[in-house]
Amino acid sequence: MKAMEEKEQPTAGLHFVGKKDELIEAKRSFRTIEGRDILIVSHEDVFYALDSYCYHAGGELQYGDIEDINGKLCIICPNHKYKITLAEGEGLYKGKVPRENVSRWFSKGVKQRTHTVTETNGDVYVKLSEDCDYIDSDYYQGEKGKAERAAAAEKKAAEQESSDLS
């Protein structure tokens, strides 16, 4: 009995999300873990996990481009081009420096919940964030956010259908 408990201990809170080679090949993978929609990103053999929907308006980050912005690897929301660092979930924006005629990147702070990724013997696991503080992306994981995303998807589909008929 003791040996079994010890064996299970290292994977406590870890959720198997796939084989390393498959996740690298896919580049982006969507998973639902404990009711939370997660995006796993593989970029240059490094794995990142974050809430799947953009903190701003629920855009599907799995369709976003990956870019290096000011030395930080970011995913760009396909809906409104919000920039989110993959490692910390920090929102970035470009603004003017007061009294100078120069633009630079600024942080909005952590806006997107990130999760821990580990790899053991070719198996990749995600451990959900244990941070109890509210993070903006949490909204789109709840019932109101899910309803808002569904309504937006219906509206987009109706607009697409209307334009196809024209």
Image (spheres, grey):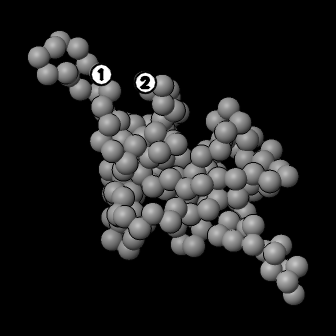
Residue at screen point 73% across, 68% down = 11
Quadrant, the N terminus? bottom right
Callout 2 touching callout 1 (CB < 8 Å) = yes
Of residue 26 and residue 107, the one placed in the foreground of this image is 107
Determine which quarter of the picture holds residue 14. Answer: bottom right
> SS for tag 2?
loop
Which residue reaches farthest left? 99
**Mark 2 neighbour class, 10 Å CA radius: few under 14, some 14 to 19, many 20 or more:** few
> Residue 124, relative to residue 90: is it above or below?
below
Q: Amino acid at mark 1?
A: Arg
User: In the image, which disc is placed on residue 70?
Assistant: 2
Q: Dividing the image into 4 quarters, which one contains the C terminus? A: top left
Q: Amino acid at mark 2?
A: Asn
Q: Position of residue 23 (x, y in %)?
A: 73, 47
Of residues 155 and 20, the one drawn nearer to the viewer in this rendering: 20
Determine the secondary structure under disc 1: strand
Image-based side of 100 in relation to 149, left or right: left
Q: Which residue, given by chain and number where applicable, does mark 1 sit on?
A: 104
N-terminal of the pair, mark 2 or mark 1, is: 2
In this view, which residue lies farthest toward the top?
Answer: 101
How far apart in space, not on screen, are marks 2 and 1 (Cα)?
9 Å
Q: Where, by quadrant of the figure, is residue 143 drawn?
A: bottom left
- Spot the residue most to the bottom: 1
Q: Position of residue 67 (x, y in %)?
A: 50, 28
Residue 98 vs 3, above or below: the answer is above
Question: Residue 154: percent from the left, percent from the top?
Answer: 38, 61
The residue under the point 70% across, 44% down is: 26
Asked if residue 31 lies left or right of residue 81, the reply is right
